[in-house]
Amino acid sequence: MAGLPSLAKKSLDRLLAWRYEQFHRREAALRLRTIEQQNGKTDPKLIRQCKDYAADVLGWQGYAPWLVAYTALAGEFREGWIPDNYFGRVVLPHLNGANKFALTNRVGAKHLFKTDAFPDIGAISNGLLFDGEGNIVDPEAFKKRLFNGHDKVIFKLDLSYGSEGRYIMTRDALDLPLLRQKGNGVFQYYIDQHPFFAQYTPSSCATLRLSTLIDNDGMCRVRAAWVKFERVEPFHTGPDSHIRIMVDPMTGTLGEHGYFDSWRKVDGYPDCDLPTKGQNIPHFAECVALVTSLHLRAPYARWLGWDVIVDSQGEVKIMECNGRHPDGKLNDVLQGPLFTDMGWENLWRK
């Protein structure tokens, strides 16, 4: 009977692994379908090359679906690409381990990294209210401090994604009992974005995603970068709710094309007549310097994604840090392979 708990755990682990791979197989297939609708069918020789590489180099042919999608988008196969399910299943546990959870929670990030670059002015955590300095306060004091100099604030639940779990509210609309029921989260003041981003999307803040990696020599630098523009009405939800523009991580220069979540490609940002190709993000060097320096303050997770906004005064603000599964696969496809120096293709052998 002593072996039953262990047997149950193994069965649960197998079920979770199966669900994980089913999810990735489906996601890769959806993107491949979208790409082939634009570009035509992928060459069978290239598909065979993806399958051989997945089996021979990465140890399992189940990594091939993402490689096929990458190849279809790039128009060629490139050795050194990291399939997204291989990254999540093999690479990320090696890089971040359990530290990915501590470095992903929005609540407390400002104090963990010891910086005022996070625009946090309050938090709800485990039923208690905290001010921007981390002090426990009562509801009346909390509300007073929350709107001290701010007409509206944003509340973001921990571990929420995109616009889900995000609430914009004024003093009169604040419902603390309701927000407490929803769970832990952080309050941030509303940021007036830099005119460079406002010219593209004046009704919502564009965010710059910078992914930092601490390499095998302990050096930290940005390996992937893109800008996310929210769509205007009626595209607030679904696969067309936002678009990504790739950014050169060395120069901060925007690319020519935009990509929806489905990887459908368009020229620039479709809701604006202004081109994106060759446009340089203002204060990009300061953005890079800030996130790399902060990452080295908490280097226990080696791969982090940072959502950054440059405000109207040119100051760099960090909206959140993500260590659970920072997404850099589109950069790897379009600008890479980006990680050939890391030896990740051999991790499965260990």
Image (tube, grey):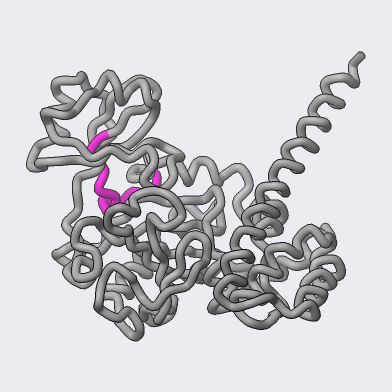
Closer to us: 223 or 202: 202
Q: Is there any visible trace of residue 113 in the rendered image?
A: no
**Quarter of the figure that contains the C terminus:** bottom right
Residue 199 drawn at (x, y percent):
19, 70
- Residue 245: name its quadrant: bottom left
User: Where are the magenta residues, as a range?
Assistant: 112-122
Is 336 located above or below residue 181 in the figure? below
* Number of numbered discs visible in the structure rendering: 0
Residue 159 drawn at (x, y percent):
46, 40
Closer to us: 257 or 78: 257
Dominant SS in magenta: loop
Let me know if residue 226 is in the magenta part. Answer: no
Q: Is there any visible trace of residue 5 in the rendered image?
A: yes
Is 217 located above or below residue 100 in the figure? below
Residue 126 drawn at (x, y percent):
40, 23
Residue at the spot 89% in from the left edge and 16% down from the top edge? 2
Residue 296 drawn at (x, y percent):
46, 59
Residue at the spot 14% in from the left edge and 20% down from the top edge? 140
Let me know if residue 119 is in the magenta part. Answer: yes
Q: Is residue 286 left or right of residue 37?
A: left
Is 172 located above or below residue 270 in the figure? above
